[in-house]
Amino acid sequence: MKTEKEKMLAGELYHATDEQLQKEHEYAKSLTYEFNHCRPDEKDKRRRIIETLLNARGTFRIEAPFNCDYGRNIEIGDNFYANYGCVILDVNRVTIGADTMFGPHVQIYSATHPVEPHLRLQGLELGKPIVIGDNVWIGGGAIVCPGVTIGDNVTIGAGSVVTKDIPDNVVAAGNPCRVMRTL
């Protein structure tokens, strides 16, 4: 029988109130609190916190405030930048490629809820993985929805709501986000 965490990462219905998940969520909240309250000149401390919280490799810069659910389900590639107010709900895997940048208040949501009311009333949730390719720029205030893949060399316009996959080498924008032109 699967644990609630295994169900969560498999994209199946799970109970977020599970003791193990609650413990991991509280740990991530403690780390993000510590990160968000570092002085700007405490760069080494901020880096250590992010390396503990996320699967981060290479160089990166994440501005405070930053928030996530668990942290360990987020993988960032080399030379990643996230501006102020980034939120990544990582109840499922979120993979972000190299040389990718987020504008202020970008929101990445792998978390979702069942549409069936009786399942929501039982406290069940689910998540779908998100993949963001290499050399992607996501403009300020954009939202990336559960299960979306964004290809390489993509620009997502500010304020966009990305509800469907976006192919490589395009500029996409709008609500819902759609391809505006090929690069």
Image (cartoon, grey):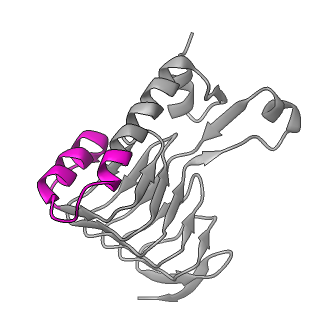
In x, y percent, where is residue 179?
Answer: 57, 82
Give the left or right position of residue 79, taking residue 114 as reference.
left
Q: Is residue 60 above or below residue 154?
A: above
Task: Give the camera-side residue of 152 and 64.
Answer: 64
Task: Give the camera-side residue of 37 and 45.
Answer: 37
Residue in the image at 48% along x and 42% along y:
69
Residue in the image at 56% along x and 21% along y:
4
41 drawn magenta: yes
In x, y percent, where is residue 42?
Answer: 16, 58
Residue in the image at 50% along x and 33% along y:
9
Give the left or right position of residue 175, taking residue 48 as reference.
right
Query: Splitting the image into 4 quarters, where does residue 162 fall?
Result: bottom right
Residue in the image at 71% along x and 42% along y:
113
Q: Where does the N terminus fall, quadrant-wise?
A: top right
Bounds of the magenta span?
A: 33-59
Q: Is residue 177 above or below residue 21?
A: below
In x, y percent, where is residue 118?
Answer: 87, 31
Give the left or right position of residue 37, taking residue 91 as reference.
left
Give the left or right position of residue 38, taking residue 121 as reference.
left
